[in-house]
Image (tube, rainbow, N blue to C red):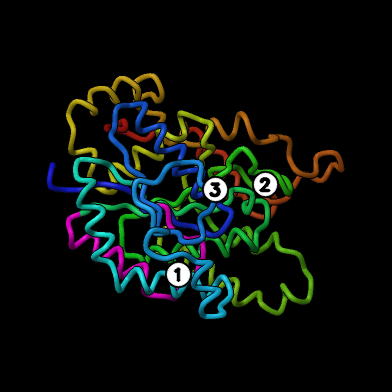
């Protein structure tokens, strides 16, 4: 294990909380005894809440690129990442000095870098050949769940990113404490974390001309996401130790770190016994969000127009889909 560098690559759209997550996860891991280093490869990152052990700003700065080549922020970011790709030996040399540490890599927020451009994927591929074992942590705002169109777009973008980055992958609904910031959810939180039948969301979209015009495209997108069966989410508020622990455990399984340090494993087993029971891990994954951040009253109860009742009348099987999720015990229990 001493020759392998384990870590996570934090990606996601602008404003999804990547830098906040990196700082919070670093503090969390240090609190449980892990030696952590943060690597910033976002040349647009300013006012970072952490001190980066490696900073791409020492190699190239976005403002310099924009001024020299007369580029906007998007074009400048693409240039910076392509420049880092050509000088990836610089990054590898820096990482070589971090052997024995667990690395958290803070990445740029331009979505096109993960869905269209090849530079980030090539950089990560070079790091894997060097000997790192990385997991991509894809953050998206949890409040998109309250908008069917945006949530379906998030699912498609997450699937595209997973396919192109080619790393073990964990999708996270960040800022779970703000999940109902722009409105109540149409369904229970498990519907969104497990990405259940998206056709129900298509039925909830407004009947305006734009939506009607693109309904077939929307249905095709939902079919693509569901047929792949790859997309699911973990809810996360960085203020919740239980949710941070759940994300950490999933990342450690994905990149293989959980098969490493036996000392840390014993320490974490004690923490797990107090955080989750043997058979209720799947329920516990969303229970805190359900209890703290969601208004359980149905969306239109005041108007005697209960949306859940309408859906039950439309499809008798829907009640089984939504209600039985909370009653299912999945075994065996989670092991670190």
Q: Secondary structure at mark 2?
A: loop
Between marks 3 and 1, how big is the CA–CA gap?
A: 22 Å
10 Å crowding of disc 3: few (<14), some (14-19), many (20+): few
Name the foreground residue: 103 vs 98: 98
Q: Contact (CB < 8 A) between labels 1 and 2?
A: no
The residue under the point 21% across, 48% down is 97
Q: Decide whether residue 113 is among the magenta residues.
A: yes
The quadrant of the rendering that contains the C terminus is top left
Outermost residue on the right side: it is 303
10 Å crowding of disc 2: few (<14), some (14-19), many (20+): many
Q: Earlier in the sequence, mark 3 or mark 2?
A: 3
Q: Contact (CB < 8 A) between labels 3 and 2?
A: no
The residue under the point 60% across, 29% down is 291
Q: Is residue 154 left or right of residue 244?
A: right
Q: Which residues are magenta?
A: 106-131
Q: Which residue is mark 2?
A: 185
Residue 57 placement: quadrant: bottom left
Q: Contact (CB < 8 A) between labels 3 and 1?
A: no
Between marks 3 and 2, how big is the CA–CA gap?
A: 34 Å
Q: Earlier in the sequence, mark 1 or mark 2?
A: 1
Q: Secondary structure at mark 3?
A: loop
Percent across and percent down for residue 284 are 46, 31
Q: Which mark is residue 47?
A: 3
Tell me: residue 105, above or below residue 289: below
What is the magenta segment's predominant secondary structure?
A: helix
Residue 42 placement: quadrant: bottom left
The quadrant of the rendering that contains the N terminus is top left
Q: Secondary structure at mark 1?
A: helix
Tell me: residue 156, above or below residue 34: below
Q: Which mark is residue 15?
A: none
Q: Which residue is mark 1?
A: 113
């Amino acid at each position: 294990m001493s020759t392998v560098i384990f870590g996570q690559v934090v990606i996601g759209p602008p404003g999804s909380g990547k830098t906040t997550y990196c700082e919070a996860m670093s503090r969390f891991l240090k609190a449980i005894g892990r030696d952590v280093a943060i690597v910033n490869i976002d040349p647009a990152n300013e006012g970072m809440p952490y001190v980066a052990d490696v900073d791409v700003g020492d190699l190239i700065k976005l403002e310099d690129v924009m001024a020299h080549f007369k580029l906007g922020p998007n074009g400048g970011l693409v240039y910076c990442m392509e420049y880092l790709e050509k000088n990836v030996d610089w990054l590898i040399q820096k990482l070589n000095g971090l052997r024995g540490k667990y690395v958290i890599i803070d990445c740029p927020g331009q979505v096109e870098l993960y869905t269209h451009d090849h530079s980030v994927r090539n950089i990560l591929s070079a790091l894997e050949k060097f000997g790192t074992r990385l997991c991509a942590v894809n953050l998206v705002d949890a409040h998109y769940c309250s908008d069917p169109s945006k949530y379906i777009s998030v699912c498609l973008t997450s699937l595209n990113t997973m396919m192109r980055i080619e790393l073990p992958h964990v999708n996270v609904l960040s800022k779970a404490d703000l999940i109902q910031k722009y409105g109540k959810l149409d369904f229970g939180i498990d519907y969104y974390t497990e990405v259940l039948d998206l056709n129900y969301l298509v039925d909830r979209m407004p009947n305006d001309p734009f939506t009607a015009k693109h309904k077939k495209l929307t249905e095709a997108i939902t079919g693509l996401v569901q047929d792949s069966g790859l997309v699911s989410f973990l809810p996360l508020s960085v203020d919740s130790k239980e949710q941070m622990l759940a994300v950490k455990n999933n990342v450690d399984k994905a990149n293989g770190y959980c098969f490493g340090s036996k000392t840390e494993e014993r320490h974490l087993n004690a923490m797990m016994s107090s955080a989750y029971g043997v058979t209720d891990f799947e329920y516990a994954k969303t229970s805190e969000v359900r209890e703290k951040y969601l208004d359980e009253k149905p969306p239109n109860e005041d108007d005697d127009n209960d949306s859940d009742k309408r859906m039950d009348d439309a499809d008798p099987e829907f009640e089984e889909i939504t209600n039985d999720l909370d009653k299912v015990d999945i075994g065996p229990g989670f092991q670190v």
